[in-house]
Image: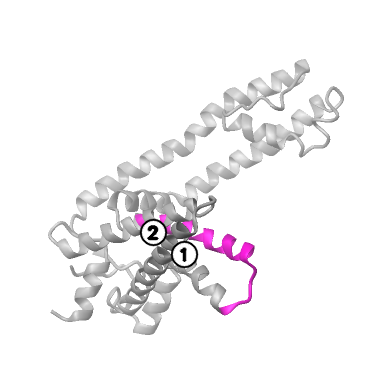
Amino acid sequence: MDIKRRIYRIIQPHKKDDTPSALFDWFIAFLVILDVSTTILDTLVLPGRVVFCFWVLEIFTVAVFTVEYMLRVWTADLLCSKTTPFKARLKNALTFVMIVDFIAVAPFYLHFLLPINLHLLRAFRLLRIFRLLKIKHYIKTLSQVSSVLRQKASQLFISLFILFILMIVASVLMYTAEHEAQPDVFKNALSGLWWAVITLTTVGYGDIYPITVLGKIIGSFFSIFSIALIAIPTGIISAGFIENFHEKKTNKDKRFCPYCGEKLDG
């Protein structure tokens, strides 16, 4: 079998009968979790020996992720035979997963290329947390979640936009009702936005709350209404999972190019 095609099949999401591809997926997922864990621990005050070990581990993981990134770009032309290799690689490099991969490794090389201070370097290195998003590329369950969110993006956007409009309305109404009674809390029409966010998301911290009768009526209405409103995105996502399940059952063992819809082999 052609080496390039074999590498392509290994680094793509694995099938049940492809052990090397499955091992590769779990190895990368393990490295992501390990690297992000060290990123979090690195924010603590640790002995110099531990810091050095973390640095060596980072060099190793960055090397693996860099090679993986280059292999994905190199084999991207196998994803789609209906376009040129250059265009296929360019489109692959501009996908969300590949951008995340790039952001995850870029901070390591950045301090070699640019004269930046240690505090800024530390902030950039924390971008390694984005590597957690890579895991969904290797674990099919998480990949399914991403697929559902992508398919229902427009409907979710509309529901969240409606939620945002209602937050603005609630903030203005609460300002009108509470400004005279609490001028230090509801200073302007947007000062009640924090209250609106907390109320409409049904969290209810209680740090800002109405004290007038009209304010309590408005608050009660939006508190009750928010329960139904928050259920809308939940219903959209649930319906998306059901549709995705039936689609995968219909198209079992089929994979398609994300650029042109061409059926992929293997």
User: Residue at the location (81% across, 29% down)?
Assistant: 176
Locate residue 63: give its quadrant: bottom left
Question: Residue 57: x and y, percent?
Answer: 39, 63
**Left or right: 237 in relation to 18:** right
User: Residue at the location (74% across, 22% down)?
Assistant: 210
**Left or right: 186 in relation to 116:** right
Residue 254 seen in the figure:
no
Element under label 1?
helix
Question: Residue 45: x and y, percent?
Answer: 54, 51
Question: What range is drawn magenta here?
Answer: 113-135
Residue 209 seen in the figure:
yes
Q: Is residue 130 above or below residue 3?
A: above
Q: Is residue 266 magenta?
A: no
Question: Residue 182: x and y, percent?
Answer: 83, 25
Question: Residue 213: x and y, percent?
Answer: 76, 15
User: Residue at the location (18% across, 65% down)?
Assistant: 20
Q: Is residue 116 magenta?
A: yes
Element under label 2?
helix
Query: Label 2: few (<14), some or many (≥20) within 10 Å?
Result: many
Residue 201 or residue 185, whichever sits in front: 185
Query: Label 1: few (<14), some or many (≥20) within 10 Å?
Result: many
Name the mark on residue 134: 2
Q: Do callouts 1 and 2 mark residues in contact (Cβ within 8 Å)?
A: yes
Residue 152 or residue 66, whichever sits in front: 66
**Left or right: 136 in relation to 115:** left
Q: Looking at numbered disc 1 in the image, what kind of residue is underneath it? A: Ala
Name the mark on residue 104: 1
Residue 106 or residue 113, whichever sits in front: 113
User: Residue at the location (57% across, 29% down)?
Assistant: 203
| Majority SS type along the magenta span | helix
Image quarter in which the C terminus is found = bottom left
Image quarter in which the N terminus is found = bottom left
